[in-house]
RNA sequence: GGAGAGAUGGCCGAGUUGGUCGAAGGCGCUCGACUCGAAAUCGAGUAGACGGCUGAAAACCGUCUCGUGAGUUCGAAUCUCACUCUCUCCGCCA
């Protein structure tokens, strides 16, 4: 959420920034409502002031045995008017909030302006795509042939965009989860959290999924709850409505959760394989930090996510997203894209963002500055560390052999009972 | 699911015959004194949001906030109702 005072103080500047994100016009409505609110507020506060002083006076008069009937009558009448104006103000505030909650974050100055992913900038590459001396297969064919991914039966259970993992496939997924968590907790200093997989609407507002993106999520029927679309939601909202101590910052959190996404509006995209699913696993990284450090922290967080790809020896590149391709809450985002031989291109596997105080305002997460005792909003960051399903896809494709088997990346072997290779077998488990 | 207790400032915790209560006291924190320095001790200060004033801020003034929402009243932390959450006991259950 943007700071209303900032919008009021320099509306043209804010409008200019929002234009980079293809948002136009809404600010005029905001300014109008804001003006109206303040004028009504001034009026009603004056009336309340009169009521307060009068009430005290009445108390005094009664104590002294004087008749306060006339004044009481007057204040009672005024009370009716106050009630009316208060209601009017409340309506206006609701409208204002509605506008503010639907405005995206303002991009950081280092973010390139652009319409869509064409405007993204490649920052760096790591690793070299392998040269195959045979025609590499797509991961869905590899998975089906090895009988470790079962798309048909998944459809029977749950419909499209679900996958059943079997035998070594299930083991691989589980190994990756443990591997990622171990790296981030043991080497990068994150605290492991196992949060609920369902959260309230308030949490969704806090991190920016609501009110605008209700269609992207699964709502629990008859309840004010949603299935988490990412662990970013429960992790960031852990500290909702709290005042943190400066000495407690920075907070580094990591969590494994399944992620549930409706994928409305992505019909026809990535229909095959496990790239785009209604349910997928992810290990997430979240940081809660002091404002002046958040951009250093973003670089570190991105490096932490990159590390697991390096350890898996999967080639990737880092993209700086342009204004048109960034998520709603982000001020700056790096995407990690892993090399996918069957696509002949890089595919997003992680997204690392600095949301600055955008989520902190919505979720009301503040901290007390060590110098002085003023409060300020924290900055929040999040990043995939990384998407597990897409990592499986990348491993299958990058580590495939001509005979259809898969070499298990070395770092994963301890997590897979020493398994070095995945072959087709009735009996593998 | 049944019965009971509770929700107050960064934390703990007083405050229910309604009227200087935004709130005693303690802890913590900040500043100062003492000290070579620290601890201990002593003194002072210390809720937030919104709005006015201001270029901005501070100071100052006002409004609101004692779980949330509504109500009674000239006036509510204190009374009424609904809801949410926490705790204890009973039942059921992985």
Image: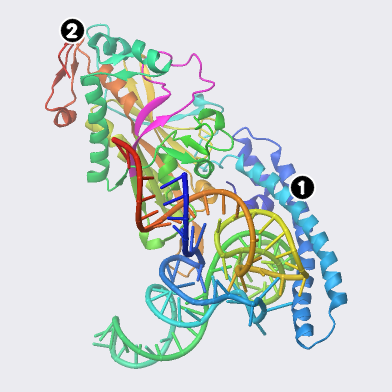
- Which range of residues does the magenta coloring cover? A254-282
* Chain letter for the residue marked with disc 2 in the picture: A
Element carrying mark 2:
loop
Q: Tell me, yes or no, if residue A88 can be seen here.
A: yes
Image-quadrant location for residue A428: top left
Q: Is residue A401 left or right of residue B41?
A: left
Image point 22% across, 8% down: which residue? A133
Do labels 1 and 2 touch, CB within 8 Å? no
What residue would you read off at disc 1?
Answer: A32
Tag 1: Cα neighbours inside 10 Å, few (<14), some, or many (≥20)? few
Residue A263 vs residue B36: left or right? right
**Image quarter of residue A205:** top right
Measured as percent of width and height from the top left, residue B28 is found at: 38, 73
Respond whether the residues carrying marks 1 and 2 are from the same subunit.
yes
- Identify the disc placed on residue A403: 2
* B49 in relation to B31, above or below: above
Residue with the most extreme left position: A418
Disc 1 and disc 2: Cα gap in Å? Answer: 69 Å
């Amino acid at each position: 959420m943007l700071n209303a005072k900032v919008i009021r103080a320099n509306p043209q500047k804010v409008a200019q920034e929002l234009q980079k994100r293809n948002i136009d016009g809404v600010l005029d409505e905001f300014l109008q409502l804001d003006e109206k609110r303040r004028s009504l507020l001034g009026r009603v506060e004056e009336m309340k002031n009169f009521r307060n002083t009068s009430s005290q006076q009445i108390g005094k008069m009664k104590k002294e045995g004087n008749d306060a009937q006339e004044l009481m009558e007057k204040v009672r009448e005024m009370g009716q008017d106050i009630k009316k104006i208060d209601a009017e103000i409340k309506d206006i505030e609701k409208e204002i909030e509605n506008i503010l909650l639907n405005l995206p974050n303002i991009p950081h100055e280092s973010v390139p302006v652009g319409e869509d992913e064409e405007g993204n900038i490649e920052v760096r590459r790591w690793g070299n795509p392998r040269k195959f001396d045979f025609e590499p297969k797509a991961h869905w064919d590899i998975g089906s042939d090895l009988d470790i991914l079962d798309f048909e039966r998944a459809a029977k259970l749950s419909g499209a965009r679900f996958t059943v993992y079997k035998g070594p496939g299930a083991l691989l997924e589980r190994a990756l989860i443990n591997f990622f968590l171990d790296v981030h907790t043991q080497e990068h200093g994150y605290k492991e959290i196992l949060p609920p997989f369902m959260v309230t609407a308030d949490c969704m507002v806090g991190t920016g999924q609501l009110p605008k993106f209700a269609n992207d999520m699964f709502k629990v029927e008859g309840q004010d709850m949603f299935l988490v679309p990412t662990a970013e939601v429960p992790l960031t909202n852990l500290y909702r409505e709290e005042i943190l101590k400066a000495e407690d910052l920075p907070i580094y959190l990591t969590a494994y959760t399944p992620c549930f996404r409706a994928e409305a509006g992505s019909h026809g995209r990535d229909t095959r394989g496990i790239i785009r699913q209604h349910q997928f696993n992810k290990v997430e990284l979240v940081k809660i930090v002091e404002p002046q450090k958040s951009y250093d922290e973003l670089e570190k967080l991105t490096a932490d996510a990159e590390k697991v790809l390096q350890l898996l020896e999967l080639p990737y590149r880092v993209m700086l997203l342009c204004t048109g391709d960034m998520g709603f809450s982000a001020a700056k985002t790096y995407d990690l894209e892993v090399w996918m031989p069957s696509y002949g291109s890089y595919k997003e596997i992680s997204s690392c963002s600095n949301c600055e105080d955008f989520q902190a305002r919505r979720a009301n997460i503040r901290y007390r500055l060590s110098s002085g005792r003023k409060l300020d909003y924290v900055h929040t960051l999040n990043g995939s560390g990384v998407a597990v399903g897409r990592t499986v896809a990348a491993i299958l494709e990058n580590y495939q052999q001509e005979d259809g088997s898969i070499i298990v990346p070395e770092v994963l072997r301890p997590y897979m009972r020493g398994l070095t290779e995945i072959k087709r077998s009735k009996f593998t488990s």
